[in-house]
Amino acid sequence: MSTDPIIVCESLIKVYTIAGLEVQALQGLDLTVQPGELMGIVGASGSGKSTLLNILGGLDRPTAGRVWVDQQNLLKISDQAMNRYRRQTVGFVWQQATRNLVPYLTALENVQLPMTLAGDMGRSARARAEGLLQLVGLAARQHHHVAELSGGEQQRVAIAVALVNQPKLLLADEPTGEVDNATAKVIYGIFRDLNRELGLTTLIVSHDAGIAQYVNRVIAVRDGKLATEKVRRTSSADADPGVDTHVEWVVLDSAGRLQIPREYLQRFDIQRRAELEVTADGILIRPVTHPDEPATATKAHTAREETSVKRTHWWQRWKK
Ligand code: ADP
Ligand code: MG
């Protein structure tokens, strides 16, 4: 039996208008996420990753299309319900850890702060905050001020803060953008452990294709649309370490359009047109040999010429 997806985006569109100019940040994006998924989102700078995450996090509203998270329609939801959604349903981790944290408070105080704001104080709140820091491997540093922690440690505190409201959905926008590779691995490892231990649905935006090692599915966003999707063949995230067990798929949108990865187009010098050939087990995409004379047009042209030649022959014979 299949469960209801936690996220459904259909033909999602986001248009920003600055000084009368329109920027289409999302151009009809389709995405379905099941509860408990651990997913990576990659794509070039400006492809729309943050826009998507901000919409899913209830920080921004889409222009058109459909977006449902945890049965809530984020296009139609009232401002009041949106505030509640942000407070109760999602946790957000930003690229700059400091955007999540108050620098002059300790790690523990930072985790307790959202609890205090929600009126949750006292010993049990403190114990919960300590537990969260333990979950991200920072128990030993809980009394350090944020400024005394390394970038990676700050980001781990930020993850603990994002978990305070026990979110159903954890969203992280380039959480490893400002740390070195070794630290990035630690941070990805924490997301993976949280996903396994708490079943937390997690979406991580990354500039780094290496994220595929830590997640079960990676989607690539290109020009505000889903372009390709990589899914791990085996169910366990730690099977065959070091071996890439992913299969890559190209994604069709709801209108049946697909984007062919740019490197394939370049490799076969496919420009404005391609030939499709149906074979026994699929469809073959081939470059057009004379791009200026597309195959179908050439045939039509030839047919017309042949008819004209035949007619001329008949005319000449009749005249004789
Ligand atoms: P990414 O996170 O993949 O780098 P973004 O989602 O930030 O991409 O941006 C997608 C496009 O939308 C870019 O062209 C960007 O300039 C534009 N954009 C993003 N946010 C805004 C905004 N608040 N106002 C105007 N344009 C924006
Ligand atoms: Mg971004």
Image (tube, helix red, strand yellow):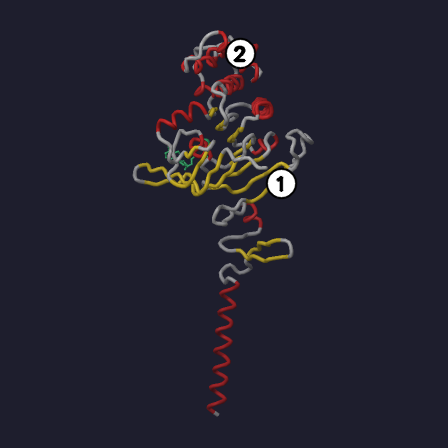
| Residue 129 % position (x, y) | 51, 13
Q: How many marks?
A: 2
Q: Residue at x 49, y 9 (%)?
A: 126
Task: Work out whether residue 276 or residue 166 is closer to the camera in this orientation and state it.
Answer: 166
Type of amino acid at the residue the image marks with label 1: Val
Task: Work out whether residue 33 or residue 241 is closer to the camera in this orientation and state it.
Answer: 33
Q: Residues within 10 Å of mark 2 (few under 14, many from 20)?
A: many
Type of amino acid at the residue the image marks with label 2: Glu
Give the residue furthest to the bottom. Answer: 320
Helix, strand or loop status at disc 2: helix
Task: Work out whether residue 138 or residue 162 is closer to the camera in this orientation and state it.
Answer: 162
Q: Residue at x 60, y 57 (%)?
A: 278
| Residue 7 % position (x, y) | 49, 34
Of mark 1 and mark 2, the one earlier in the sequence is 2
Task: Work out whether residue 213 or residue 281 is closer to the camera in this orientation and state it.
Answer: 281
In the image, the residue with mark 1 has its CB under 8 Å from the nearest atom of ligand 1? no
- For this view, does 311 lie left or right of residue 279? left
| Residue 163 % position (x, y) | 50, 20
Give the residue furthest to the left. Answer: 20
Cα gap from disc 1 to disc 2, whole angstroms: 40 Å
Q: Residues within 10 Å of mark 1 (few under 14, many from 20)?
A: few
| Residue 8 % position (x, y) | 48, 37
Q: Which residue is the site of mark 1?
A: 247
Up the image or down, 14 lies above or below 187; here it is: below
Q: Which residue is the site of mark 2?
A: 130
Name the image quarter holding residue 55: top left
